[in-house]
Amino acid sequence: MIKRSTLFSLALFILVSVPAFLSGQDSGASWKAGISRIEITPSQNMWMAGYASRTHPSEGKIHDLWAKALFLEDSNGDTGVLITTDLLGFSKTLSDRIREKLQKEMGLTKAQVILNSSHTHSGPVLAEALTDIYPVDSSEELKIREYSDWLVVQILKLAKQARNSSKEVSIYTGNGVARFQVNRRNNSESKISELTELKGPNDYAVPVMKVENKKGKIEAIVFGYACHPTVLSIYQWSGDYPGFAQLELEKSYEGATAMFFQGAGADQNPLPRRSVPLSKQYGQQLAASVNRVLSEEMKPLEPQMKYAYSEIDLPLEEPPTKEKLVQLTEELKGYQKNWAESLLEKTKKGETLKTSYPYPIQIWQLGDQNIFGLGGELLIGYAINLKKMFGKDSFVMGYSNDVMAYIPTEKVLSEGGYEGYSSHMVYGLPANWKPGIELSITRGIADLAGQLGITPLVSPDELTDGLTPP
């Protein structure tokens, strides 16, 4: 027979333990987080990134540009920092400079740092990024170098401020939905008002992370969407629709910092576009989706953090010969001509043209929330496949750590077009990717996940369906 005192002790244990279990947060441990932000709007007018059609430097601003940081520490003392920016994208050179400083001064490895850009086309040109498409003179080149050097210093300062402001928090995640992204390869922008159905792959998810202090106040709202910030093509600084979304959320949640990350939006455009009111509208739509998620029950994350990082050697097609480049300089126009001339100059100097590229992939696991960070202008197909592999609630970030080119799926690579054939020219790569890129990347992610004990629901080989070679 069980004694009455034993039954009383068991009941007391259940009363104490069950609420803690249901909450998802260990009563004896919690996350620590620090949040910081730094304005990065250029102090002078300079060349804007994203459009080769621009003919002169910026002329003022619609709203300021920001870099923001979320520093995390789990119950075991493992740390990481997510940095989001209102910028087009970091080159490998600039990204490596930043991450090397974070390693030297804060002890953070590449695996512990996610450096994401919103890909706004209303931010400044950065050093060694798409340089062949901008008709800048020496004075503008100096502005770009000086701004880029200043930016490195500011991001290091930002990360340190975030670390130094750490305090105990709870973290929650969820997913919303917004439907203004349109697959630009499969739907004509000029006929968008006539279309009654949209074609092509899409991912309308709005991933959301909430960081809440011990009093229940929201300290940070991290959210993403997979869509080009190309509503605006004017000459004023802005974060485009992500900038308006962040402003809207920070207005609604006083004292909170809203941080936007770009997803796999390389083949997705906001349509219709080309007006400030539309940019505000999309920002409000995105903020409304985030607000809905924040207002509902969200998944609590245990204070445990895992991370892994790797660089895959992705092969390129054979680069053009010197003779072919001479021919191309005579046949091509615009940025394509600039690309051919730049490569020709390298060959004349005896430089060896790239035949492969070290492509960055990354995984964070916060509690049971999987977050994937991939470099380049990532097409939506990667988000779709990664969610099939690791669950529909996975967060997928493109434009992370190094934006070196478009990253097409195998289908798009075979179809050609801008994303599948010619976009490497704007980034200065000597050739397009070789077939097999999709399988190489998804296998790389699966291997990285294995290091963290994460098992895919389906294998990369099952998803590719014979589109790529073994």
Image: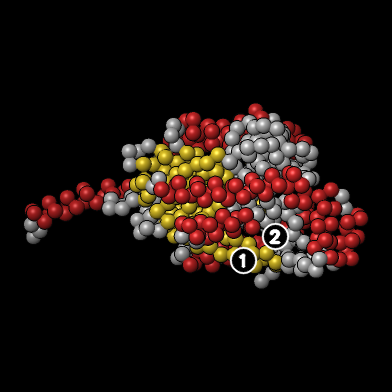
Nearer to us in this view, 6 or 70: 70
- Looking at the picture, which amino acid does disc 2 mark? Glu
- Quadrant location of the C terminus in the rendered image: bottom right
Residue drawn at (50%, 48%), measured in percent from left and top? 157
Which is more foreground, mark 2 or mark 1? 1
Q: Residue furthest top?
A: 277
Left or right position of 174 against 439: left
- Quadrant location of the N terminus in the rendered image: bottom left
Secondary structure under badge 2? helix
Asked where in the image residue 139 lies, by quadrant, the reply is top right
Position of residue 447 measured from the top left corner of the image (x, y, whole percent): 54, 67
Reading the image, the residue beneath label 1 is 312
Position of residue 98 measured from the top left corner of the image (x, y, whole percent): 56, 55
Residue drawn at (50%, 41%), measured in percent from left and top? 37
Nearer to us in this view, 231 or 257: 257
Q: CA distance from mark 2 to mark 1?
A: 17 Å
Q: Tell me the number on the disc at residue 410.
A: 2
Left or right position of 176 against 304: right
Position of residue 318 measured from the top left corner of the image (x, y, whole percent): 78, 67
- Looking at the picture, which amino acid does disc 1 mark? Ile
